[in-house]
Amino acid sequence: MALIHLFRKCNQHCVFCSWPQEEGRGGDADMRGWLKEMASMPPGLVQISGGEPLLAGAYNLCLLLAAARKLGSKAELQTNALAAADMPAVDLVKIVRALNAAGGYFNVNFPASSPETDFKITRASGGFNKRLAGVRRLIKAGAEVRLTHVVNSLNYRALPAFAAFAAKKLKGAGWIQFSYIKGVGRAEGSRFLPKYGAVRPYLEKALAAAGKNNIHCEVDHIPPCFLGEFYRLNVDMAKMKGKVKGPHLQEKKHVPACRGCRFFKLCPGPRKDYIAVHKTL
Ligand code: SF4
């Protein structure tokens, strides 16, 4: 798995952005640099991120996705989907076709089931309705869509509402990943990281509701010991079982409270940035 940040340009200003616009690469397209970076990556899953990748435009994205395909990589296009609401249909279809040809999918950051919470998190005026329209257009154009719901202190009590919203309003989305906020970038050491124990009852309700509606879910960055009967949905467990190397091993670490845990060998522990804020599980 490899990650490429195209640029820092973005049409949102999320409170949890792990790669704030004030850092890193500039705001312009750099096709030569992107292709070079992609060619140096191992084949496998390439995650195309930003800023907001759709702001690179259809022409650039199609070139990039064709390159990924040629390198034998599967592509994940990470997006907030706002630009998909307004983009000319011909461009949208071109991107969807190029992504499908690269065996890929859109990973849409969908942080809320209400406009009010969406705005609190993304600071994008009108973002909620645009995102909804954008995702629906992607699905209609034949894209596979994963919804990533970043669990944070502003939305965790509404996790069951999000599961119900997805079942009703986002039919056709492939699956939901409930991904606990990373305490890095703009969220480093912040008040946006709720305790796992506080999230647990809401998350369990959301996972049960999604299951009833036949929506597949997975959970990242919340250890299996906080998932009750849904512990198998934790994405690290399969990686640990398969002895897969990756960022989960660098970002997470066992803590004294892990001693004696039945998941010890299948869980790399909590995120280090979570422990930096909360000290223990
Ligand atoms: S190893 Fe630690 S973090 Fe992981 S499930 Fe067990 S107690 Fe929880």
Image (spheres, rainbow, N blue to C red):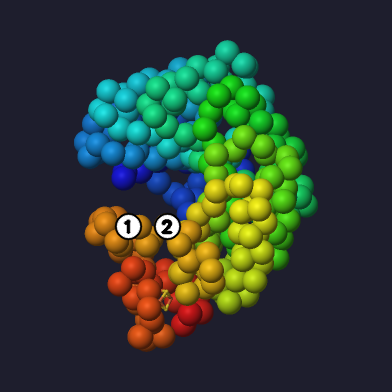
Q: Is residue 188 above or below residue 144?
A: below
Q: Which residue is mark 1?
A: 239
x then y, percent, for residue 33: 30, 30
In the image, which disc is placed on residue 209? none
The structure residue drawn at horizontal position 50% and vertical position 17%, both measured from the top left corner, is 94
Q: Secondary structure at mark 2?
A: helix
Do the CB atoms of the residues marked 1 and 2 lie less than 8 Å apart?
Answer: yes
| Circle 2 Cα neighbour tier, 10 Å, few/some/many (<14 / 14–19 / ≥20) | many
User: Residue 28 or 114: which is nearer the viewer?
Assistant: 114
Amino acid on which the number 1 mark rests in the picture: Lys
User: Which one is nearer the viewer's eye here, 181 or 169?
Assistant: 169
Residue nearer the viewer, 194 or 125? 194
The local secondary structure at tag 1 comes to helix
How many C-alpha atoms fall within 10 Å of the one at disc 1: few (<14), some, or many (≥20)?
Answer: some
The residue shown at (62%, 16%) is: 89
- According to the image, label 2 marks what residue? 235
Residue 143 visible here: yes
The residue lying toward the viewer, choosing from 43 and 15, is 43
* Coordinates of residue 43 in the picture (x, y in percent): 25, 36
How far is mark 1 from mark 2, CA to CA? 7 Å
User: Which residue appears at 76% of the width and 47% of the height?
Assistant: 115
Residue for point 34% across, 68% down:
266
